[in-house]
Amino acid sequence: MRTAHNDFLNARFFAGLDGLRCLSIVAVVAYHVAGSHQGLVGRGYLGVSLFFAISGFLITTLLLRERDKAGHISLRGFFARRALRIFPLYYTVLGLYAALVFVSEKDAVVRGDFFANLPAFLTYTSNWFVPPAADKRVIFYFAWSLATEEQFYLLWPLVMALSRRTWTPVLFMGGLLGVSLLTPWAVSAGLLDASYLGVRVLTSISASICMGCLAAHLTHSPKGFAWVSRVLGQVWSVPLMGVLLAGVVVWHEAPHWLISLVMTALVVATCIREQHPLAPVLGHAWVRYVGTVSYGVYLLHMLALNGVRKALPGQGVAVYFVLTLAVSVVAATLSHRYFESWFIKLKGRFDWREPRRAPEPRRVRAPQASAPKPGSLVGVGVEA
């Protein structure tokens, strides 16, 4: 078991997570294309919760490893890496939305609402200030999930970096998990009023992110890893969690905490044991690739959907889904290769895992026609 834990701690990549990201983004695209809460497709919005579970687990795992190997958590490095990965495409797409809305949106109310909401979109606070509306379109509303992620990126590393005791972040995140589960119940029971900003902030806490963070702390510990592996480290663990996830997704009355728990268990099982019956699916080259560019797909898929609908009016949901997904993946590929890659390369300067290479020494070569004079530095390596 110690060898398995060491292999887990030393794993640089978790290949199965890209496969799970692919499943998540496909579910979200299907949900937005269908535009309905009915049936299995109507549960596609839960793909965002799976993204959250992946994010909570992966970010916390990386922070724990940095603290162990580097001796501390570099907030400057973390925030720089996140900014370089997230901000360029996000603000570019938001600018594109602003231009398109200004030029082509005919509904004055919808257009006015978008520009009124723009400060929230710019500051990643739309999950607090842009409520959903059943009777009208809210352009760029899907940014609520990105706001939730960004708030997590801002708060959680601070807690981990500033905590002097290893159990302090666990207690903090456990408290947030309790708040994330109790606050929606209190609102539905009439005990809290969601019109207050403080209540909206509390309801925006993601249980899936919290569970992912706690699971990362558990598996980072040798004893915790040994305990978790008994259930989630077996050959059958990933298929079983997949079946359970399908069951809770189909079950419309399933409580959200149960869905988040099963999703987190699936994420952990995929990372603990990469060789399992579903590995050929999650590890397929195309599946992993879509997961790799899933951030771009998420930001661009609504533009793709609207473009496909205008180009081919009157088509069925299945046609729109296939075309929207295809156009989104192509657009995300172009973005990733020719735009995002420039900023991704810069991340390496702030990555604690990348060794800093010392400059190679300059060497002064001796003239071939004559021997060096006594006392000269010819032929001696001189470090720059």
Image (cartoon, helix red, strand yellow):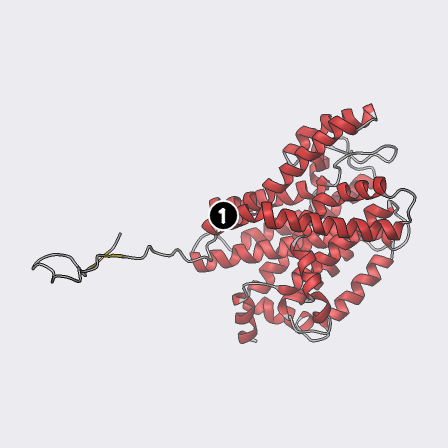
Look at label 1 and name its amino acid: Leu
Give the labeled residue for mark 1.
346
Q: Is residue 251 left or right of residue 377?
A: right
Residue at 16% x, 58% y: name it: 378
Pinpoint residue 353: horizontal percent, then vertical percent.
47, 58
- Point out the residue furthest to the front here: 369
Residue 290 location, quadrant: bottom right
- Residue 198 in percent (x, y) is at 69, 34
Kindly tell me whether residue 322 is visible in this rendering.
Answer: yes
Q: Please name the residue shown 68% across and 52% down the image.
A: 294
Of residue 339 and residue 169, the one placed in the foreground of this image is 339
Residue at position x 61%, y 64% from top? Answer: 14
- Asked where in the image residue 114 lies, by quadrant, the reply is top right
Label 1: element kind: helix
Residue 231 vertical position relative to residue 85 in the rendered view, above or below: below
Q: Residues within 10 Å of mark 1 (few under 14, many from 20)?
A: some
